[in-house]
Image (tube, helix red, strand yellow):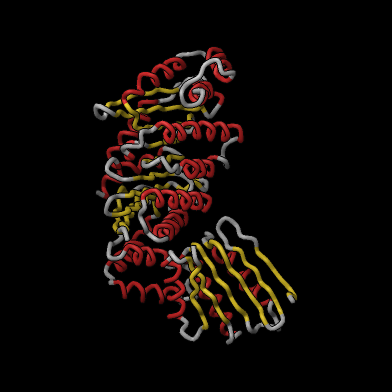
Amino acid sequence: MLDAKFNLAQLCNKFPLIVFYQGNYQETPSHSILNIVEKNISSNMKKPAVRSILYLMIEALQNIERYSAHTHSSDDYSLVYSDNKFFHIYTQNVIENVKIEGLKKRLDSVIDKSKEELDEIYSKTLSGDERTEKGAGLGLIDLARKTRNRFFYEFNTLDEKYSTYSICFAIPLNREDYESQPNFNESKEIIKKLNHNFKNNLSTLFYGGDFSNNFVRALLDLITTVKKENIINHSTKIHHVLIELTQNIRRHAYKTDDHVSGQLCIEWQKQNLCISTYNIIEHDKIEGLTKKIDSLNACDFNGLEEMSKKSLTDFTEESGVGLIDVSLFAFPNKIQYLLKNDLSIGTELLLKINLSHD
Amino acid sequence: MINDTFTIIAQEDTPFVSLEKKEGHNQIVIKGLSMPENVLEFYAPLNDKIFSFFDGAFENIQLDINLEYMNSMSNKQLLKLLKNMAEKDNQLKVIWRYNEQDDLIKHKGAEIQSIFPHLNLQLEEIAN
């Protein structure tokens, strides 16, 4: 199980930002996903590019909210990632088979159009000459305009009543890439990998990107929304565990130019909530860390509480009690870890914690 | 009558703090979220400010703590602050507020009670 997570690790090493959220979009966690992306891109992209990306994300995420049949939440998801040349937005939702034909017509009416033709359709639709049943279809036309028609779509039958509808857009990030074509096959491969790992979850958040407190705040908002949706009570345990684990990544993970290469994965499952983190840490920190985790895993609950108190009142040491707290919250589950691939810059570390539903 | 006040505005990862010096009743409020990456940057100056602000009147202080989330390093710095304050003001009163659904913050308050059994610390539930 832990080993399988390593197969996804290369995604956060390859892309400076990747956010995948699968689950119920009815109560919309969209604003939280937008918030997470905004915190990531606003410091290193020009304002018009940020606005354009966020605008397109709103359209794409609202399409899931509005048009999904909301029957199989594990089939509703969004993936956004940047490869430094393009910003990719991939969404999928469940749709009733009877609606496919109409939607396909609308998509085909814009897919091969030139910029001028799209502008004309946009103006006509805006002035009310052409209307669709839910809104004016302006969102779709605008997505095609703003991405310079770099998108693909597909339908896959689930059963006699429902299918999945996927659409993927790519926004060029640099002027020199305005004429290049994105690698949509890569997007499909990523989705295939993510689906393979997470298809049985109630909800999933898979994230690689900035791990500063800006991100943590946006993450806490998302968790609160998802908790309400899934009606799973974890008190605030999950929030505290996430604060400790994300700050551990920020503090201890290998960095280049202040960019932390790390990954966070939260899986809402029927029996558990599973949190895993991945990052590279320096070789000389491995022994101390694994010894600490082994000693925590060997403790009973009282032993962990004693250890927490001892560490909290040792004012000569500035370090916190992060991993002790995580062990206490997860008890009787243990902190699982796996080390792999001894790289020149450090060792890959995967941590996994299961929190039982209260 | 309030004689003097000092306020620290809450930031994305640090709490709101207010210090009030009144006749016969001094109050400190720490409220919100505490998870700075570098806790000492926040708590070391706060500790100094509290001692300089109440200098000469370091007595009958009520410390009102109402935290939504905190990281473990903030927890430790808060304990250090409580210890330093209790050593100077043996009448120090601490109110530890927690949301009615938040067992974890309640537990953190109870943990402080067991670490400092002589500290006058009250746990108070806040309705949702």
In the displayed structure, A13 sits above or below A153; it is below
In the displayed structure, A294 sits above or below A249; it is below
In the displayed structure, A275 sits above or below A322; it is above
Question: Which residue lies at the image location 68% right of the left edge and 78% below the top edge?
Answer: B54
Q: In the depicted view, which residue is nearer to us: A334 or A282?
A: A334
Q: In the depicted view, which residue is nearer to us: A111 or A258?
A: A111
Q: In the depicted view, which residue is nearer to us: A90 or A181?
A: A90
State the quadrant of the C terminus of chain A: bottom left
In the displayed structure, A99 sits above or below A292; it is above
How many numbered discs, if any?
0
Q: In the depicted view, which residue is nearer to us: A36 or A128?
A: A128
Residue A97 at x, y = what percent? Answer: 31, 25
Question: Which residue lies at the image location 29% right of the left edge and 29% below the top edge?
Answer: A162
Question: Which residue lies at the image location 43% right of the left edge and 57% below the top edge?
Answer: A239
**Residue reaching furthest to the front:** A133
Residue A271, image quadrant: bottom left
Q: Is residue B109 left or right of residue A306?
A: right
Q: Please say whether residue A248 is visible from this viewpoint.
A: no
Question: Which residue lies at the image location 32% right of the left edge and 29% below the top edge?
Answer: A164
Q: Is residue B95 left or right of residue A20?
A: right
Residue A183, image quadrant: top left
Q: Is residue A109 left or right of residue A196?
A: right
Q: Please say whether residue B82 is visible from this viewpoint.
A: yes
Residue A320 at x, y = what percent? Answer: 45, 67
Residue A119, image quadrant: top right
